[in-house]
Amino acid sequence: MDVLSLIGGILALVAVLGGNYLEGGHVGALLNGPALLIVVGGTLAASLLQAPMNVFKRALQIAPWIVLPPRIDLQGGIDRIVSWSLMARKEGLLGLETVADSETDGYARKGLQLLVDGAEPEAIRSILEVDFLTQESRDIQAAKVFESMGGYSPTIGIIGAVMGLIHVMGNLADPSQLGGGIAVAFVATIYGVAFANLLLLPIANKLKAIALRQSRYREMLLEGLLSIAEGENPRSIELKLQGFMD
C-alpha cells in the first residue's frame, strides 16, 4: 500500500476543510449538488469524448495503483538474473527451461524462453523492446486520461460559475433565489480547481511515475537476459545492472 498517497489525500482534505473552518465557514457551505454534478459530469464527459475506449478502460484498470501499486523489486530482479546466469554457465541455456516454465512474470518468461530457444541477442532485444515500450506507451496514455481531466476540471468549474451567475441575474427581482445561484457559482469553481490540483493531476503524475518504473524494471531484465545470451560473467552482469537501482 502506498502510504504517501493516503497521507496526501487526507492532508489535502484537512487543509481545505480546516482552512474553511478557521475562516468561519462550515462544511455545509462546500456541499452543493448542482455544482458537483456540473463539474464531475462535465469533466467525465469531456474525458470520454477525448479518450478511445481501450485507453479509458486501461485508465480505470491502473487507477488502484494510487494506493496499491504493483510491486517492483529492482534488487530482487537483479538477484534473479544473476541466479539465471549462474545456472546458464553450469547447465547451458537449456538449463533455464525449467525456470522459464515456472516463471510467473510474463515478460521474464518470454525472455527466458527466447534464451532457451537459442535466439540471437539482437532478436531477443528486438522482441522484448517492442513489448516493454508498447506497455509503457499504453500505461502513459492511460495516465494522461487523468491529466486531461485535470485540465478540463477548472474550466468546467468556470462554466458552473457562469451558469450560477446567469441564474442569479435572472432572479434579481426575487432575493430568495439569489443565495442558491451564488452558491453554485462559487462552489463550482472551488470544485473544479480543487479536483484538478488536489486529485486528478497528482494521480496522473503518480501513475506516470509507476509506469516508468515498471519500464525501467523490464529494461533491466532485457539487459540481463542479453548479457546471459552473450555469456557474460555473472559478477559483471550484477555490476552492470546495479546502474538501474535508485
Image (cartoon, helix red, strand yellow):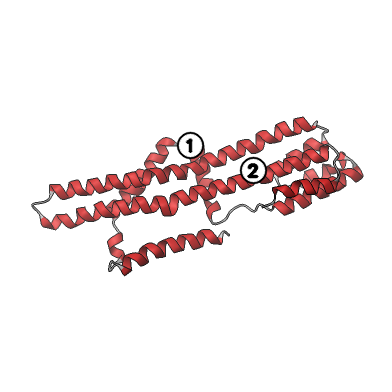
Task: Tell me the kind of residue under disc 2.
Answer: Ser
Residue visible at 50% across and 61% down in the picture:
6
Q: Which disc, if any, is residue 215?
A: 2
| Residue type marked 1 | Met
- Residue placed farthest to the right in the image? 90
**Residue 114's disc number:** none
* Residue wearing tag 1: 53
Q: Position of residue 201 (x, y in %)?
A: 45, 49
Indicate whether 185 appears above or below 19.
Answer: above
Circles 2, 1 touching at the beta carbon (< 8 Å): no
Counting residues from the N terminus, which is met first, the one under dot 2 or under dot 1? 1
Q: CA distance from mark 2 to mark 1?
A: 23 Å
Tell me where residue 227 appears, x and y as whole percent. Answer: 80, 40
58 over 171 or under it: above or below: above
Please indicate whether residue 198 sits to the left or right of residue 155 in the image: right
- Give the label, 2 or 1, closer to the camera: 2
Place of residue 195 in the rendered image (x, y in percent of width and height, measured from the top left)? 39, 52
